[in-house]
Image: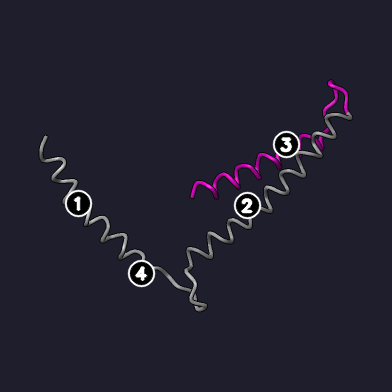
């Protein structure tokens, strides 16, 4: 039982060293920026546009639902729900990375 804390103390500096090596070997673009930072920035912009489209589709779906009777479901409404689901999955997958 006393070996576990000692083992943790010994491995911590090794983990920190690996992290420093990863940062030193980060891929830089010709502009000097980090490739990972540019990828994250592009994904963030894609998320913003997808969420804006998601809001627009949700508002359109709400308007259609308010206009229609409870027994009427248009094909357009179903297509909008499918598109909303695709957008949500796309944004969620980007956020999980």
Please tell me whether mark 3 or mark 4 is closer to you in this view: 4
Q: In the rendered structure, are the residues bearing label 3 and label 4 in contact, judged by CB atoms less than 8 Å apart?
A: no
Q: Residues within 10 Å of mark 1 (few under 14, many from 20)?
A: few
Instruction: Please tell me the numbered disc located at residue 11.
Output: 1
Please tell me whether mark 3 or mark 1 is closer to you in this view: 1
Q: In the rendered structure, are the residues bearing label 2 and label 3 in contact, judged by CB atoms less than 8 Å apart?
A: no
Above or below residue 31? Residue 14 is above
User: Which element is circle 3 on?
Assistant: helix
Q: Residues within 10 Å of mark 3 (few under 14, many from 20)?
A: some
Residue at the image position 57 percent from the left and 44 percent from the top: 92
Nearer to us in this view, 32 or 89: 32
Above or below residue 71? Residue 83 is below
Measured in 3D between alpha carbons, the distance from the residue under mark 4 to the one under mark 2, in whole angstroms, is: 28 Å
Measured in 3D between alpha carbons, the distance from the residue under mark 3 to the one under mark 4, in whole angstroms, is: 44 Å
Within the magenta stretch, is there residue 76? yes
Residue carrying label 3: 81
- Of mark 2 and mark 1, the one earlier in the sequence is 1
85 left or right of 71 in image? left
Please tell me whether mark 2 or mark 3 is closer to you in this view: 2
Residue carrying label 4: 25
85 left or right of 14 in image? right
Residue carrying label 2: 47
Residue 40 locus on image (x, y percent): 53, 59
Q: What sort of colour scheme is used for the picture?
A: one colour
Above or below residue 57? Residue 19 is below
Check the image and name the residue furthest to the left. Answer: 2
Measured in 3D between alpha carbons, the distance from the residue under mark 2 to the one under mark 1, in whole angstroms, is: 38 Å
Measured in 3D between alpha carbons, the distance from the residue under mark 4 to the one under mark 1, in whole angstroms, is: 22 Å
Q: In the rendered structure, are the residues bearing label 2 and label 1 in contact, judged by CB atoms less than 8 Å apart?
A: no
Magenta segment:
68-97
């Amino acid at each position: 039982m006393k070996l576990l804390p000692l083992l943790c103390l010994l491995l911590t500096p090794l983990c920190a060293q690996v992290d420093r090596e990863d940062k030193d070997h980060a891929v830089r673009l010709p502009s000097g920026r980090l490739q990972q930072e540019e990828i994250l920035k592009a994904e963030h912009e894609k998320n913003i546009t997808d969420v804006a489209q998601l809001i627009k589709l949700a508002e359109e779906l709400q308007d259609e639902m308010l206009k229609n009777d409870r027994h009427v479901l248009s094909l357009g409404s179903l297509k909008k729900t499918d598109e909303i689901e695709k957008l949500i999955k796309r944004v969620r997958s980007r956020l999980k990375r």
